[in-house]
Amino acid sequence: MTEPGGCFLPYGRHQIDEDDIAAVVSVLRSDSLTGGPVVTEFEQAFAARVGARFAVACANGTAGLHLAAMALDLGADDTVIVPTLTFLATANAARYVGAEVAFADVDPATGLMRPDDLQEAHAKVVNRKVRAVIPVHLNGQCVDMEAVAEFAGRHGMRVIEDACHAIGATYRTRAGEGVSVGACRHSDMTVFSLHPVKTIAMGEGGVVTTNDPDLHTALLRLRNHGMVREASGFVQREEAFDADGQPNPWYYEMPAPGYNYRASEIHCALGLSQLRKLDRFLARRRELADIYDRALAPLGLLLRPIPRVAGCASGWHLYVVQIDFNIAETSRAALMRKLLDRGIGTQVHYLPVHRQPYYRSRYSNVKLPGSDAYYASCLSLPFFPAMSGGEVERVVATLADELVLAE
Ligand SMILES: *Cc1c(COP(=O)(O)O)cnc(C)c1O
């Protein structure tokens, strides 16, 4: 399987150290496994790290997107704009609340939704209210959020950032100010994933950030079955209060159903421990990206890294190259199988979501050529902090070998 001297390199992998294990073990020895102080500590640390007022931990990034859609009260009368070059969950979050999806195209070079793509997607929606947009910071690079916020403001739309790839990313405003992804400067909420293949791991986990106290309250309620426990929020006075006007000790109310989307103490202990390493992981990812860029340069037009977006310090979730398979004279599938035989895991992120059977049958005749072009040539190479520079060079040498052999 693997060449002598090298172990298998997946396209992404978590990194767990002894102190992460100790943090989890300490929760396991404690009195609370869920709904305790570590959840709050993690949420506060996360909010502080990204510069938001509030952070709500939840079961995973998908749950976070669903919570955000519910908190905005999106429903069957609404349409949500979603770039088609993303993971399934971004679009599915709209469908979970009954909203329709209007797919936006992306830049064929970066895979990011451009302001023009947003405008075009919006213009195509007739006779329906476009209530929200979910820009996706693909690969860790930033969407032009200032432009998205301006457009959304003009058209009465809310904004949920899908930052599942972009924890730790920052972008520069036109005025030259640095903004942390998650600070919600140009959005209502930002959603993160802490799945092990992402930059930091909780096992399964997600976080939603916001600066809006009402959205924060809604997120907390919806994460926990839709339950209201504060007496000030009770509407059924007869049920809620005793003869003296005191709230009944057992009592809670549910104005509308939510879900059990909580994150446990165990998961949050890992999230908190990993959060402390975010800067170190990001620095290492940046170094590895630079090594890749340099090593790949001689392959020139046949293969090039995704161009870096000006003004964005990427969260570097993935290292993606675009390969011209017309010149390469090999198919992507054949190349991926050859690389796998030589111990190198690669992946394609992503088949445009509008081309999934469910969305094809729901919305026929969607044509988004930018995303088709991006998809046709993209390949995610092994990329994780524990990789060595030598391993990056091994990947590049193997790629060069296979691409040249194919000619
Ligand atoms: C991973 C991911 C999600 C979903 O996150 P989970 O934690 O796996 O549920 C959503 N959107 C994007 C862009 C992702 O990469």
Image (cartoon, grey):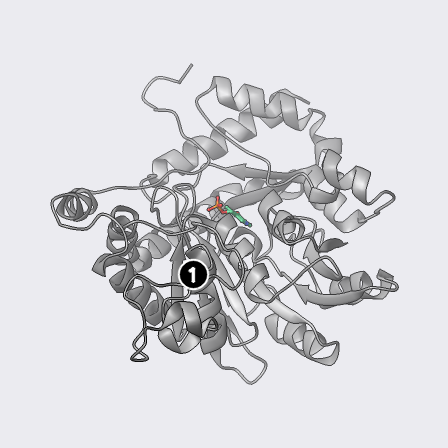
User: Is 257 left, or right, of 82 in this rendering?
Assistant: left
Where is residue 346 drawn, in percent x and y? 52, 32
Is residue 245 toward the left or the right of residue 312 in the image? left
Residue at the extreme front: 243
Percent of width and height locating residue 143: 60, 64
Disc 1 marks a residue whose amino acid type is Met
Look at the numbered disc 1 and give the secondary structure of its residue. loop
Q: Is residue 262 visible?
A: yes
Residue 394, given in percent of the width and then of the height, sits at: 42, 31
**Closer to us: 16 or 231:** 231
- Out of 134 and 64, give the one closest to the viewer: 64
Which residue is drawn at the image coordinates 34% and 24% (left, top)? 7
**Is residue 390 placed above or below 305 in the rendered structure?**
above
| Residue 169 visible at all | no
For the view shown, which residue lies furthest in the bottom direction? 175
Task: Compare residues 314 and 223 and report the one nearer the observer.
Answer: 223
Q: Residues within 10 Å of mark 1 (few under 14, many from 20)?
A: some
Q: Which residue is mark 1?
A: 227
Residue 6 placement: quadrant = top left
Q: How many marks?
A: 1
- Position of residue 328 relative to residue 303, above or below, is above
Please state, as top left, top right, bottom left or bottom right, where the C terminus lies in the image: top right
**26 relative position to 132: left or right:** left
Which quarter of the rendering shows the N terminus? top left
Above or below: residue 191 compared with residue 233: above
Q: Decide which of 19, 141 is in the foreground and name it.
A: 19
